[in-house]
Amino acid sequence: MGYISKNWNGVKNGLSLSEKLLDKVKPGLSLKNRIESSQKQLQLQISRLEGTQKKLQINHEQIFKKIVDAKMLRDESRARSYAIELQELRKVKNAIGGAKLAMEQIQLRLNTVSELGDIVVTLSPCMSLIKGLTPSISNIMPNLNSSMQDLSNMLGDMISDSSFSAKPIFTPDQNTEDATAILNEAHNIIEGKTKSSMPEPPSTPQNLTKESESII
């Protein structure tokens, strides 16, 4: 009873069990410091993605204006070319937006860890999420690849150091399912925002002719 009371007092003083265990394994790297380091890495990636997203939005508006101008001049060929270019830009913009939202979800999970100290259950889905994001983001923004790897390593170290039980408290299937749910949520949000904020570009000769006639 005295042991339980002693540990309960430790929790009340703001020191979680997971933090105690991590401090024993790596005294120089407390749970709080490691979470803060991961949060800084995440915020850096989110800021970079946000900056890229803003540039893509500017390009989007410029290209769409060129489509309208081409239609006004009845230049169907040029309007179609710009429409194809705009569609490709939207794919990249959606990928960037989805990755940003997913990273914000990871950031929320890190905040939960700092409050609850439940490292393995909370962060395990994040590992699959990062691994899923890395290939697609690396193709669009290669400079993020090493930073994403560093973040993955930091989260992996925290999970490994906190896994003191011989019996895992999560399964790979659960891990993948949680990560997929987060990715789907981010995808649905970004799709909804895109549909509500961006008009569809003309993609066929019929559409170009009809919209040109309506404008003129």
Image (tube, helix red, strand yellow):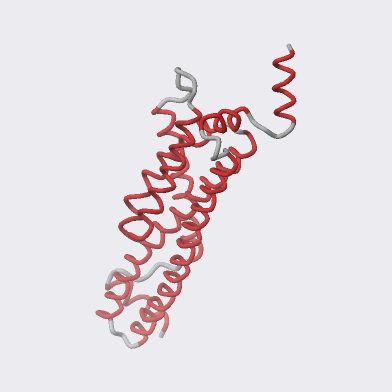
Which residue sits furthest front? 28
Relative to residue 83, is residue 162 drawn left or right? right
Relative to residue 10, is residue 144 depicted above or below?
below
- Image height check: is 36 above or below 55? above
Query: Residue 162: horizontal and vertical position, in percent?
Result: 51, 29
Q: Name the residue rendered at 38%, 64% in the picture.
A: 90
Instruction: Judge by depth and name the residue closer to the eye, 66 or 33.
Output: 33
Work out which quarter of the rendered image holds the C terminus and state it: bottom left
In the image, 21 versus 68, the foreground residue is 21
In the image, taking residue 139 as reference, residue 100 lies left or right, namely right
Q: Which residue is located at x 50 percent, y 52 percent? A: 42
As displayed, is residue 157 above or below residue 59? Answer: above
Q: Name the residue at the bottom extreme.
A: 73
Q: Is residue 202 left or right of residue 118?
A: left
The one nearer the camera, 185 or 18, is 18
Q: Does the rendering let one see residue 133?
A: yes
Residue 9 image position (x, y, % from top left): 75, 25
**101 on left or right of 86:** right
How many labels, in total?
0
Q: Is residue 191 visible?
A: no
The N terminus lies in quadrant = top right
Residue 62, above or below 95: below
Residue 168 in which image quadrant: top left
Identify which residue, 85 or 209, lies in the foreground: 85
Which residue is at a point 42% across and 82% down the rendered structure image? 215
Residue at far left of view? 77
Percent position of residue 97, x then y: 45, 58
- Taking the view exactly as shown, the residue that stands out farthest to the top is 1
